[in-house]
Image: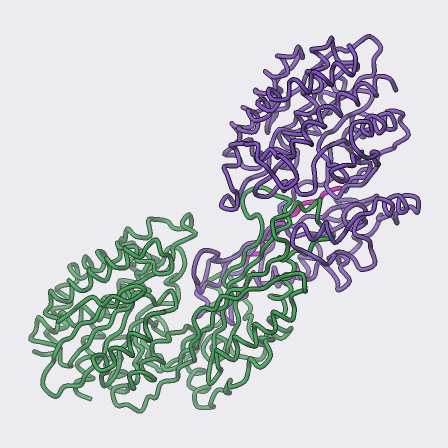
Chain colours: A green, B purple
């Protein structure tokens, strides 16, 4: 029962591990679309069976939304207790015509920098989730995991996690551990692993403005009837000022300046802003003037339009004056920004811009604070050394622009810190067509978790 | 062969006339969507057969787009020659879930102000087109039409009429007449018929702004990557100034002030702005400040967003930073406004607002000048008297906010004036779900055309 034999077993079991991942990727577990609720249940059942097969006491736990999966491995007496979290649900796949293959028919394909696993969920988060499962399986085959392990797999991460908080509260005793391990983040670069210690919060708002009570002919009514698309455009245009700052009143309350030490550490990472933007066809940072690229994506708050629609959007032209216009708008939050206060301020700002003749309705989506991990816990440094042993470069503590509200809930509800360790790359196209996960991420990921379990047991 | 016997025949033939109209309404001849090209051909064939059945020398004339239908009735020696124009194509029907019944399964339903014919195209323009066909049929059954009649039915009116100008030019000799009769407009109110003598032109532009080369995760890229929806919103928000004027440079070049005489005539019509807007759930005129409601819809130019889309617009929330944002924007033109100059000025304005990091593409749709008819031709006053005899109130010369480019083409290509006479009502919901045509419009419409043919023959 040694780390080396576990790593050897992972290497020997690679093809079977890939087959298991492909089985999971074939299940279209899209959580935001009610039509796929049954598929989410299928993915949960698949995971329960897989965990049971390696000796985990696992079960499906139904919720008002998609089911949770919970499992337990006892570990040696007195060993540290870790809770591992991942999510089995995935994002929608549209626009489907931009995919080169069926998003739910995974394949190993040769990419420009080596082989990749191509499928929706390959990186976010099924592939990442399975790196831990495979590490635990290898430890089990070699005599047992060195830590006590609780597994928690969620099926609503991509749709605002409505069942998560009640579930954590109702099962707090069962789920509490010494520290949480979360695999839903990325490498700093393909050779540099990272532990994410700073996460932005997320606030989602859907705004619908209604003008006329029905779609009108723009010839007959154009000029006299208020067009809600025009109102919505004015609202969206007012959300940023000329310097790229978000113009919602009070938005920057609780936004801290970056400590000099962290600023220096990030500068040392040598982030290549031009390459980062160039990879997606852009050149100019679009955020607040005077901020570095890493600040824009890790430590500054933002406001983005995630979607908007009004009137006729099919082929050709239709001279309609639309009845409705709507937008999905989200805010990324940092420091002590209060999502509920910002929601109210945003709604008041919008109401103040809508003419008396129009109605505005809001549909609130997720609202989570930012999280900043305390890296004092000795497991952090132990895990950082374990990762450094697996990858070409030393591991780094970094920030992340994305929002993983679970880390905040683990702290507030279960009273434990989280270590966010993941192996995604920037070009994984998560949430986009042709999502992929590098085979190297998967292989080194399984080995990394084997090492981290060993290191945490010894910390 | 007298007007009275023709009117009696129309009254006796009413049920069969409705059945014929329903047959035509059952054909989903949506011209803007290539999937329905075959259905447009079916509608053209149906019309050719119907005309032949009443002795018209009719034929289908194929074009690069949807077919035209042309037919001839000789009329008495020396009688005036009229060209009648209507269109058999219809608007798309989405959003389909807002229809109370299948849009292509017409039915006679009881409405709040009497029976209505419910179907896509009932009012725009199949029902209107058939009012003339039925009048001609009745005259034929009573010995022959009192005028020489040429029929021209188009199948691309709702999609910018791309084949119309070439067709008119190639067939100018066959199609030229003393005056054109066009049935694609409305009553002033349910008791007051109208001859429309002032029509706005139309310019359509589709703008697509591309930011990143693929849809991005708004957590990973939000803040640093330019969001094209934000750019598009700024463009749309800049199209109108605070006073409701269109802010495209040079837009008002060639816009005339309304002559005092016309202004007085319109004031006398007693247009009820509150009722007009109230019928569609609005209260406040949204056009240029200081203009009357009739000016806003008849004699002032406008700019409207007909549709816009970006990012994720399905159910739930998706934290995507979209690659593209696009809008369909149209301008209604008056007086001597030059659609081509405005198109160039609009494009230059948009290009000037798009950051270097984004690309903008334009797709130009129809571009037509406004039309103002000369009412000196004696047929105008004769027709006005004929309409006044059929309806409760005297007929009026009015303006129209809609764009019927054909009237301009008839003048410039075929050298003749047009009389725009139609029987639609403001609440017909043309281009919208649950389109209808009042049975009263259809019945009095057929009788009106019987009278107008008689009046024009004697003018």
The part of the chain drawn in magenta is: B201-210
Whether B207 is among the magenta residues is yes
Q: Is residue A371 left or right of residue B222?
A: left
Instruction: Give how far across and how far down residue B304 sits, in percent.
Output: 68, 52
Instruction: Give how far across and how far down residue A304 sits, in percent.
Output: 52, 68
Residue A441 visible? The answer is no
Whether B272 is among the magenta residues is no
Is residue A27 placed above or below A52 in the rendered structure? above
Instruction: Give how far across and how far down residue B79 sits, in percent.
Output: 83, 13
Is residue B18 placed above or below B345 in the rendered structure? above
Q: Which residue occupies the foreground of this view, B295 or A141?
A: B295
Instruction: Give how far across and how far down residue A358 sits, in percent.
Output: 64, 61
Res. B176 image quadrant:
top right
| Residue occupying the point 57% across, 20% down | B46
Main secondary-structure element of the magenta-colored stretch? strand
Q: How many marks?
A: 0
Residue B110 visible? The answer is yes
Res. B9 image quadrant:
top right
Q: Is residue B19 left or right of residue B8?
A: left
Work out which quarter of the rendered image holds the C terminus of chain B and state it.
Answer: top right
Q: Is residue A145 left or right of residue B447?
A: left
């Amino acid at each position: 029962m040694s780390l080396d034999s576990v790593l050897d077993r992972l290497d020997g079991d690679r093809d079977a591990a890939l087959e298991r991942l492909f089985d999971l990727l074939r299940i279209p577990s899209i959580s935001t679309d009610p039509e796929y609720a049954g598929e989410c249940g299928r993915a949960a059942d698949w995971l329960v069976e897989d965990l049971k097969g390696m000796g985990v006491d696992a079960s499906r736990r139904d919720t008002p939304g998609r089911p949770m999966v919970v499992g337990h491995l006892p570990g040696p007496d007195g060993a540290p207790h870790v809770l591992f979290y991942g999510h089995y649900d995935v994002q929608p796949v549209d626009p489907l015509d931009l995919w080169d293959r069926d998003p739910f028919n995974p394949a190993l394909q040769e990419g420009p920098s080596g082989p990749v696993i191509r499928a929706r969920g390959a990186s976010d988060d099924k592939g990442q989730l399975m790196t831990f499962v495979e590490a635990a399986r290898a430890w089990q085959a070699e005599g047992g995991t060195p830590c006590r392990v609780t597994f928690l797999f969620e099926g609503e991460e991509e749709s605002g996690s409505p069942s998560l908080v009640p579930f954590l509260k109702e099962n707090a005793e069962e789920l509490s551990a010494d520290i949480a391990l979360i695999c839903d983040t990325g490498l700093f670069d393909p050779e540099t692993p990272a532990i994410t210690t700073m996460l932005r919060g997320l606030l989602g708002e859907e705004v619908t403005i209604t003008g006329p009570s029905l779609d009108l002919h723009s010839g007959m009514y154009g000029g006299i009837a208020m067009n809600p698309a025009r109102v919505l455009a004015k609202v969206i245009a007012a959300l940023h000022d000329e310097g790229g700052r978000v113009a919602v009143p009070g938005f920057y309350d609780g936004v801290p300046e970056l400590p000099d030490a962290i600023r220096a550490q990030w500068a040392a990472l040598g982030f290549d802003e031009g390459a980062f933007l160039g990879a997606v066809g852009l050149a100019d940072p679009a955020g607040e003037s005077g901020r570095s690229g890493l600040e824009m994506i890790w430590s500054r708050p933002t406001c983005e339009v995630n979607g908007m629609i009004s009137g006729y959007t099919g082929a050709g032209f239709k001279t309609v004056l639309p009845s409705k216009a709507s937008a999905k708008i989200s805010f990324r939050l940092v420091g002590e920004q209060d999502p509920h206060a910002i929601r109210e301020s945003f709604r008041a700002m919008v109401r103040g811009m809508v003419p008396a003749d129009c109605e505005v309705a809001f549909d609130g989506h997720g609202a989570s604070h930012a999280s900043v991990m305390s890296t004092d816990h000795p497991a952090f440094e132990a895990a950082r050394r374990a990762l450094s042993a697996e990858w070409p470069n030393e591991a780094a503590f970094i920030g992340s622009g994305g929002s993983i509200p679970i880390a905040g809930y683990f702290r507030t509800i279960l009273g434990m810190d989280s270590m966010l360790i993941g192996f995604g790359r920037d070009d994984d196209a998560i949430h986009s067509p042709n999502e992929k996960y590098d085979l190297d991420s998967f292989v080194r990921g399984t080995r990394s978790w084997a090492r981290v379990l060993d290191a945490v047991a010894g910390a």
